[in-house]
Amino acid sequence: MAKLSELRTLIDARRASTPSPAASAAKTPSSSGGATDRAGSAKPVAPASPARRIAASKHADGDVDLAAAFADVEPIKPSNKAPVRASPPAPVPRQRIADERDALEASKYGEDPAPASWDIGQEPDGEQTFLRPGLGSDVLAKLRRGHWKVQSEIDLHGHVSDEAHDALADFLVAARTHGLRCVRVIHGKGLTSPNREPVLKGKVRRWLARWDDVLAYCEAPRHAGGGGAVLVLLRGR
């Protein structure tokens, strides 16, 4: 059996040939940029990123050639003037003009042309028109065709004879006071009267003929009341 001293010698020799755990964990940088331990073994290193490789070389393949990229771009010419564009001509509303012309003609002459019965002296109703003696025969034609604009009107519907007479008198006095020349008096056609006979129609027209300030009157055009109203021309101031 070997002696105890020889066994101790063998253990010390084994320890001398085997590195300790602390020594194997210690690392030293290698010449290739990696890390090595004291035994000389090399540790693998992660490759560099593309950006770092491009930055490492001034003329690397990843650089962008701006001259080549903008070769087909035309530079903007310097100018200190704003572009001036001629404005297009204003459109002409031809249809609207035609509609307004037709509406104006209808307001003056009515939708239908004046019948021959409107010639002075040929009226079928003796109270259809009135003209103060001494005035020209063209006054009635001008009155009916809208030569004088209607400035005010009164509606006598629902009035009995006495009420209608007083209301008409007050209306004519106020019109003369304000200097009005042409007014419209609506007396109705008598459609709601007994036997459908007009009551105020004849009375109103006779009252108008007796007023000295009334120069003329004529039955209103169809669109302005027709047989239910009269246009009245008053004396000027």
Image (spheres, rainbow, N blue to C red):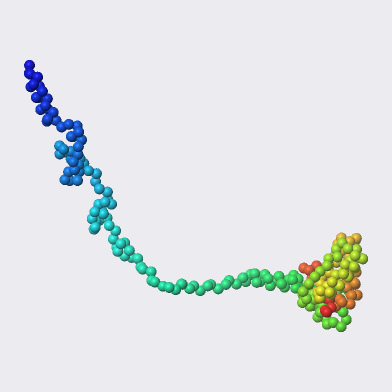
Q: Going by the image, does 48 lie left or right of 103? A: left
Q: Is residue 68 above or below residue 52?
A: below
Quarter of the picture containing the C terminus is: bottom right
Q: Name the outermost residue toward the top.
A: 1
Residue 127: percent from left, percent from top: 88, 73
Which residue is nearer to you in this view: 219 or 72?
A: 72
Quadrant in the rendering for residue 192: bottom right
Disc count in the image?
A: 0
x 83%, y 67%: residue: 154
Which residue is nearer to you in this view: 30 or 112?
A: 30
Q: Name the outermost residue toward the front.
A: 5
Which residue is nearer to you in this view: 25 or 168?
A: 25
Residue 33: percent from left, percent from top: 19, 46
Q: Going by the image, does 55 lie left or right of 108? A: left
Residue 197: percent from left, percent from top: 89, 64
x 84%, y 71%: residue: 174
Q: Is residue 20 above or below residue 219?
A: above
Residue 156: percent from left, percent from top: 86, 65
x 9%, y 19%: residue: 4
Query: Is any atom of residue 222 visible in this view?
Result: no
Q: Is residue 41 above or below residue 77?
A: above
x 38%, y 69%: residue: 76
Quarter of the picture containing the N terminus is: top left
Quadrant in the rendering for residue 107: bottom right
Q: Going by the image, does 87 lie left or right of 210? A: left
Which residue is nearer to you in this view: 171 or 225?
A: 171
Query: Is any atom of residue 198 visible in this view?
Result: yes
Quadrant in the rendering for residue 177: bottom right
